[in-house]
Image: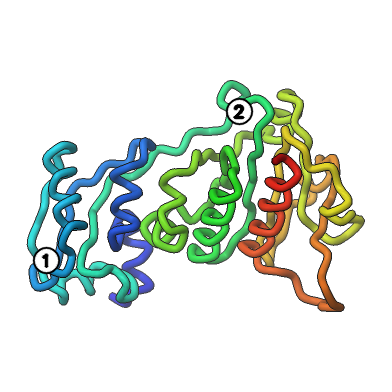
Amino acid sequence: MIKEEIRYKDGCIFEGMTSISAVINSDNGRKIKRVLYDKERAEKLGKALLFVKHRAEEQGFEMTESDAETLDKMTVGSSHGGIIAECTDRKINVIKTDNIIENGFYVFIEGIEDPYNFGYALRSLYAAGVDGVILPERSWMSAAGVVCRSSAGASEYLSLYTAGEDLCGIFKAKGYKIYCADTKNAVSVYDTDCKKPLLLVVGGEKRGITKKMLESADEIIMIDYGRNFGSALSAASAAAVLGFEIMRQNR
């Protein structure tokens, strides 16, 4: 089996200390079942390994000595640093009126084609202070370990939800504006009032945002470029630019 296939088969393998620490320190319902570490790298892991062993005693998960060959077969790439964790799935609730905070900032992500880009988008949005991210029915949380690694742990700290049948109606009932990031009939984000409460919708580079969602938007916003350039930013880059502009306007 090639590593690309393993990535989707073993979506709850979390690689490296950053990812494992995020699972240990988050409160989203995901649990560690077992941590495996390369016994040849135990000394190099040092205090990090001691930290995990202490948490294993507190949280009741198993610590298992292993070797580099075994860890390499279980993981994607080579950045696990000699330590990985087998984890349970995480339950992601449907967004409802009663779990939307007052005067918040949420993002709905549609159509990102790659779990790494998805993770990069979550990292930026978490740093920009988003209160929650809403996912379509098909999302990359089936590859949660890859997403966690590319988001530097942010995916485990973020409040994540799946979209209900009437996502726009739910947010409008709470007094939220809905802005979609697109180019057709759009106004510059820098000339737009992005004060909260706000739901931002970001689409992937290929499929973009659905027509129904665009028709429900209060505003279509775009990112100004510094020169004439005919290509779209990646969804992760767009999420970062928009997320931090919204943060700036709400300081």
55 up-or-down from 101: above or below: below
The quadrant of the picture occupied by the N terminus is: bottom left
Q: Residue at x 11, y 66 (%)?
A: 42
Query: Badge 1 is on which residue?
Result: 42
**Quarter-wise, where is residue 183 in the image?**
bottom right
* Coloration of the structure image: rainbow
Is 238 situated left or right of 28 in this image? right
**Residue type indicated by callout 1:** Ala
Where's residue 149, x and y in %? 39, 61
Q: Residue at x 72, y 48 (%)?
A: 248
For the C terminus, the quadrant is: top right
Q: Secondary structure at mark 1?
A: helix
Q: Percent from the top left, x then y, of residue 25?
A: 32, 42
Q: Which residue is mark 2?
A: 100
**In the displayed image of the protein, which residue is found farthest to the right?**
185
For mark 2, does the 10 Å Cα neighbourhood hold few (<14), some (14 to 19), or many (20 or more) residues? some
Q: Residue at x 69, y 32 (%)?
A: 166
Closer to the N terminus: mark 2 or mark 1?
1
Please give the name of the residue rendered at 40% of the width and 38% of the height, measured from the top-left corner: 91
How far across and down, in percent of the image, does residue 133 sit? 57, 43
